[in-house]
Image (tube, coloured by chain):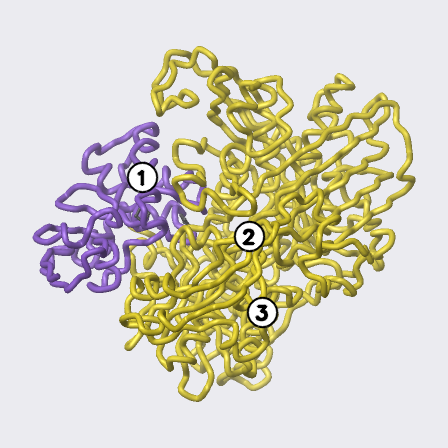
Amino acid sequence: MRIELRVNGEPCEADVWAGESLLYVLRERLGYPGSKNACEQGECGSCSVLYDGKLVCSCLVLAAQADGHQVVTVEGLGEDGRLHRVQEAFVAAGAVQCGFCTPGLVVAAVDLLAHNASPNDDEIREALSGNLCRCTGYAKIFDAVRLAAGT
Amino acid sequence: MSVQLELGRVGEVVPREDGIPKVTGQFAYSSDLQAAGMLWGHTLRSPHSHARIVAIEISEAVTMPGVHAVLTHEDVPGEKLYGLEFQDQPVLAFERVRYFGEPVALVAAEHPEQARRAAERIRVAYEPLEPIVDAERATESESLHPERPTMGHGYRDDPRPNVVRSLVIRHGDPDAKGDVSVSGVYEVGIQDQAFLGPESGLAVPDGEGGVDVYVATQWLHVDRDQVAPCLGLQPEQVRIHLAGVGGAFGGREDLSMQVHGAMLALHTNRPVKVVYDRQESFVGHIHRHPAKIWAEHRATRDGKLVNVRVRILLDGGAYASSSTAVTSNAASFACGPYAVDNALIESLCVYTNNPPCGAMRGFGAVQVCFAHEAQMDKLAAELDIDPIELRLLNALGPGGSLPTGQRVTGALPVAEVIRRAAALPLPEPEELPRDPLRVPGGSGNTTRGEGVKRGVGFAVGFKNIGYSEGFDDYTAARVRLAADGNAEVHCAAAEVGQGVANVILQVARTELGTDDVTLAPHTTATVDSAGSASASRMTWMASGAVRDACRAALEERERNGGGEVDIERIYRHPRTSPLDPETGQTTGERSHVAYACAAMRVVAEVDVELGLTRVVWIGTAQDVGKAVNPQAVTGQIEGGTAQGLGLALMEEIQTRDGLITNASFTDYLIPTTLDMPPVVSELVEEAEPDAPYGAKGVGEPPTVVSTAAVVAALRAATGRDLARVPVRPDEIVGL
Ligand code: FES
Ligand code: FES
């Protein structure tokens, strides 16, 4: 079937199979491989995107459902060629190692700060608890969120 | 705020050179690759842990929509067996399958779903066989590898069936008696590397019979040396290129899709991409060896260790992988970083029909550290000595020797890391009531914390840096200086997230005295081997090779009076020697090149009614030689600690009759932000004399020590033995 959606502000169209996830279509059909595929069953958060402004796991959204909706991926967070402050903070704080979790964590942190401009550590802990990272032990991810929040 | 992309030198905090592509989603991981005309490969795997293959029928599968190839063992063009150290593992199973998930057939199709559906139509007739799943009985069972692939390599000759390696270390008088003795039996479950980036890669035929494989791996050249013979090709016809790696931790040392993808690509003459899903990843790679360890420590009344007797049983699973080296590491480090004059250490690894095991961060030292540190605490309790004092009293250091007879010559500041970790101030106990998020199990709103007890644990551990036992361990680097002074560095050292790319650039900038340095793609095509990104060796080895190549390039340019230079250099660490097969003693000056140690203190709260745990705080001091990039070093410590905490509290591959029953992140849990406390890291910088810039590897010591330290805190909180990891809630409650 054919779907139309907006990805990072750009109108897109794709021919999809009924069973394909939004994640698959973003990655394999629309040229946005930034969202990652660490589990494809809603357990790791590596595929996190903003879907009509809400944080979702794109592996759990059927592509067919996304027809007519707005999606923001990690590729669409910066503005005018500049990094989003959360992206800058992740680099500066050393919150990236292999980086496979990073796109999902960056999107989740952007979502957190949009709702809570200066979260405390427990709030960060809770907000990011759906995003697995195997490399960092999370310490520098906390640092990055604090740095981006200016707290 | 803006990111300062400081082009730092050795010893400075340098943001990752791949940081910006990674935070913007531009970094190309092995699962992100695309090529025109690309097909998708899929692997059909065995549903049995042990079965005879009676017949494989592919005729229906080949007619399925979108299918371009269906291949079985009959289509393997060259050698049908491969292996990291011993050729004992079939590229595709023939005659029998020996583990759950063993690859049996391959499909290439236009859509990944078409490939999966076609694979379901391959009819494999199996005759199930009794699986060998009890490691303790493996040596009395039928032989899974009657041709005994690991025998005759200079190891002790153990004639029993299913022995992968058996090593006995006799040190001093193994019957020496002490005033007191404590014993225990310890068990470690199967841990998974659980890197987030699933196994994946793209194989592209070159049109002349050869193939390029873009893959996430840890050792490009040894992949090539295994892949080429299986394809019946010359090594130079197979080029392995590093694609973006989503974590490794030992789990990418063995081949995954490399031969399979290349077979499909050569057969169809199209690029073929293979991406495992999470379930396939859990069954498709080797794991950390589960272990059972019997230990007895004998000591004098005032706490000096007299004799340590340890028996270690490792379940290697169906194929050897790197089990022989793990067996030896477990034996080498079985006594911990303590001076022991007498020891008897028996380390045995067996073949079974359980999931194959091989390299994982800590490599044999993790399992024994859990046991020796529990024993040290037991001994301290028996003697009524402070456990930290007991460790200081027995601390190994330069001049001391290992049970293998090897004298410690380089830096090994065991007493110093103990003192530094012990001196870290502990957080104050927290009051109740408090935010449920800060109560064990509280995020589930199960309790207000009435049953919470606090415990403080301590542990010390160490392991080797670099390859041991006579292995020819080297790394090549190539430096090209352009006439305008710009430098290009080639090194096949795999950047797996640990930050070796930065190390290479920092070293090159330091040596060449310029910021104008680029790192060429990691590949087998332009430079010799770098060895594996494992054994905490890559920083040391890549630094040595890049340093030497840079210095040689500058000299050459000087000699030529300017102009272009292109020079390759090989770096080797001091030569090691094998262990004597009968006594386990080193046959030369050294069997390990160097060690790194760490001490860790853990505060945990345990709800003794619910059996739930919250680790509150971790403080650690680690022997790093020299921190090449302090931010990356603490990142390794924090991440390595999290993996050890995972093994202590939650991570275990579970099996029934050899079948993995929890191959998902729903059922195999790894630590989240809710599980990880803050980690305070002290870097102990005592330069390693043989290492470039004095730098040691840093990735493994935190994983070695943290499992032991976390469980020590749980024991302190509960008063229970907790002799098995991961600790289960019912063991905490005492059910
Ligand atoms: S890939 Fe979507 S949650 Fe893991
Ligand atoms: S940086 Fe590797 S998974 Fe988070």
Q: Is residue B98 left or right of residue B383?
A: left
Label number found at residue B376 = none
Residue B544's quadrant in the figure?
bottom right
Quadrant into which the N terminus of chain A falls: bottom left
**In the rendered image, residues at marks 3 and 1 fall on the same chain:** no
> What is the spatial separation of the Cα atoms under label 1 and label 2, in whole angstroms?
45 Å
Q: Residue B164, position in %: x, y?
A: 71, 55
Label number found at residue A145 = 1
The residue lying toward the viewer, choosing from A32 and B12, is A32
**In the rendered image, residues at marks 2 and 3 fall on the same chain:** yes
At label 1, the amino acid type is: Val
Report in which chain the residue with disc 2 lies: B
The residue lying toward the viewer, choosing from B419 and B335, is B335
Using the rendered image of the protein, determine whether residue B550 is visible from the camera's viewpoint: no
Tag 2 residue: B49
Secondary structure of residue under mark 2: loop
**Mark 1 neighbour density, 10 Å: few (under 14) some (14–19) many (20 or more):** many
Residue A44's quadrant in the figure?
top left
Residue A138's quadrant in the figure?
top left
At label 3, the amino acid type is: Val
Tag 3 residue: B222
Q: Which of marks 2 and 3 is nearer the N terminus?
A: 2
At label 2, the amino acid type is: Ser
The chain whose colour is purple is: A
Secondary structure of residue under mark 1: helix
